[in-house]
Image (tube, rainbow, N blue to C red):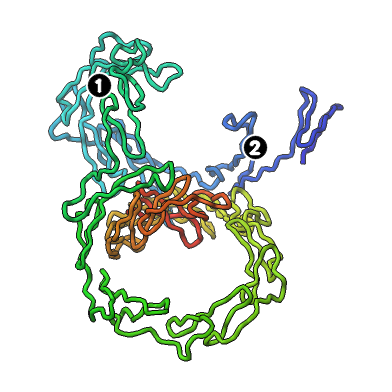
Amino acid sequence: MFQVTCSIIVVLFVVPGWITVLHGVEVELAVPCNKTCVHSGQCVITPDPTCPGSGFKQTCNCPPSYTGEFCENFLYKVECDKICENGGQCVVNFTNDGCTSFLTSCVCPPTCYGELCEFFPICDPPCKAGQGECVVLRNSQLAPHLTDGAYCNCSMSATGYYYGNQCQHYQQTGTCDPPCRNGGECNYDGRCNCQQRPNSNSPYESFTGCSEFDPVCNPACQNGGICYSGSCECTSTDLGYYYGSACEQFQDNTICDPPCTAGQGECVVLRNSQLAPHLTDGAYCNCSMSATGYYYGKQCQHYQQKGTCDPPCRNGGECNYDGRCNCQQRPNSNSRNFESFTGCSEFDPVCDPACQNGGICYSGSCECTSTDLGYYNGSVCEQFQDNICNLPCQNGGTCTRGYCRCRHSNSWEYYGPGCERFRDYNICSPPCEDGSVCQYGSCRCISNATQYRSGSDCSDVTECMGGCLNGGTCLIGGKCRCLKEYTGVNCETYTGCPCLNNGRCIDGECDCVANETGMFQGALCGFFTFYYPRYPPVLNGGVWSVGNIYCPYDDVGYFHGNQCEKYSLNNCISSCIEPEVCIEEGCICPYNLTERRFTYTNDKGRCKGQYYF
């Protein structure tokens, strides 16, 4: 609400959402100041040139001895007692692990080191006099396990520069003839670095001193190639690409490069253009398989031997690569014929008495059938029950086995005994506050480095005093959840990444490395789980990882199938909330097969954390 006061009569023109006053009259507005200041700090609103228009910014006016965005830091005078030499500066740092400790040290210039900057680095071999100086390489400040070093920082001038581990070599700036024009600069190799010409993505031609536009291509570009800076940029098709000085040669995509290993696989064409018009054909090595094992890899260069089944498989069963029997299916049944753990030597339990009315025996029990009019039940499917629901099914619901099966999608659903109620997943009641996201009818609260949000509408706020540093997140109780590389009350201390076996620290978790035969797992990637290599191979850039097939996708659709050999269009009913992406008919966490990076879902249903193949 606006409160308007003034000492003279003012004519007001009231428009919904606006208040207009005559020029030159001051107007007082009651604006909430809601920044949470601590230690008796006062919230004030002051003009800020970084805000749009004549904007203002809320800040905390702190009492003496306090500072910080929320007045959360106490000012304490500490004597810096280090007498630094050679231009070093005395600084004070502190640690806070229950007790606050102050540490004084010297920050040295690049040309010296030591507790008081009293030592000069020694470059071995030494730098050439007058051509460079020996400076310290402070690796220990990047990570505590690294050691400092020294190197020669070579000199540079307008006419050239020195280089080499002793600055013993000299490279003279080239002479451009003709001289560079139109703002171009002469490079060390005697060529002009030219500015971009107006209304074009290409620069002036460097060979003629930035004085002329791009030359023409002679001979002219063929097969749709485009002339750029005197060279042809060639085009590609579904079957391959053109190359050569005039795009006169063609490279067929149906050739395996690198070639398949002789006798272990053959090159076959992958006709993706027949799946969707925007896809291109390719080629892959179809690896060989025998009774004893199979070849795998991009060139069929690796071999995996079959396992040994003990006892041996019987009744037509085949020994799998993991040493278990794949048993045949028994006649007139959808269950396996024999038990795999005992070498396909025993049948599944039979149903006695036998199943009636089309029921199927499975593992000793009858699975009963249903029709449009009703369904069979009972131990042998001997009873028939009409499809009668106590309440009529509304809004397109169907009666199934005495209950209403209601319609639903990714963004809405009908529910209730008769499908009489409706819920929109994109509408939250009460509405979500302060940037939180409504998803599936519930508010997904978003916390940050200074605040933890909770509650049905994310309106409950807990402050983390001093804020969580270095990527830390404020949690319930006002405590910081630090990334694995940091520790301390405010995540202020760097400890290094503790992940093992080339695991990476990302978003507070260890992202473990996987390969064609398995994956490192555990909180610190400490143990390895073996998975058998995939046969037949995964195509179209798909990845076989830890027993799962990951097929690539694009903005139009997605590959799928046992080898990622099929392609279908996306059909998501509702839009996905970032970072989720639409694949098939739903929203999932994204993955990047080019970078071999996968995103997994954490226990709160959010896309967070990654592992690499």
Q: Amino acid at mark 1?
A: Met
Q: Are marks 2 and 1 in contact (CB under 8 Å)?
A: no
Please tell me which of labels 2 and 1 falls first in the chain: 2
- Please name whichever residue, 225 or 297, is drawn nearer the observer in this view of the structure: 225
Judging from the image, what secondary structure is the residue with disc 2 in?
strand
Which quadrant does the C terminus fall into?
Answer: bottom left
Crowding at dot 1, Cα within 10 Å, few <14 / some 14-19 / many 20+, comes out as: some
Residue found 46% across the figure and 51% down from its top: 568
Looking at the image, residue 584 sits to the left or right of residue 171; the answer is right
In the picture as drawn, the residue positioned furthest to the top comes out as: 178
Image position, residue 541 (x, y; %):
34, 49
Residue 10 placement, left or right of 510: right
Looking at the picture, how far across and down is residue 152, in whole percent? 20, 31
Query: Mark 2: few, some, or many residues within 10 Å (few <14, many ≥20)?
Result: some
Res. 377 image quadrant: bottom right
Q: Label 1 belongs to which residue? A: 156
Q: Residue 205's image quarter?
A: top left
Residue 141 is situated, as x and y percent measured from the top left of the image, at 31, 43
Residue 163 point in image, percent of width and height: 19, 26
Label 1's element?
Answer: loop
The quarter in which the N terminus is drawn is top right
Q: Residue at x 39, y 44 (%)?
A: 273
Q: Which residue is mark 2?
A: 45
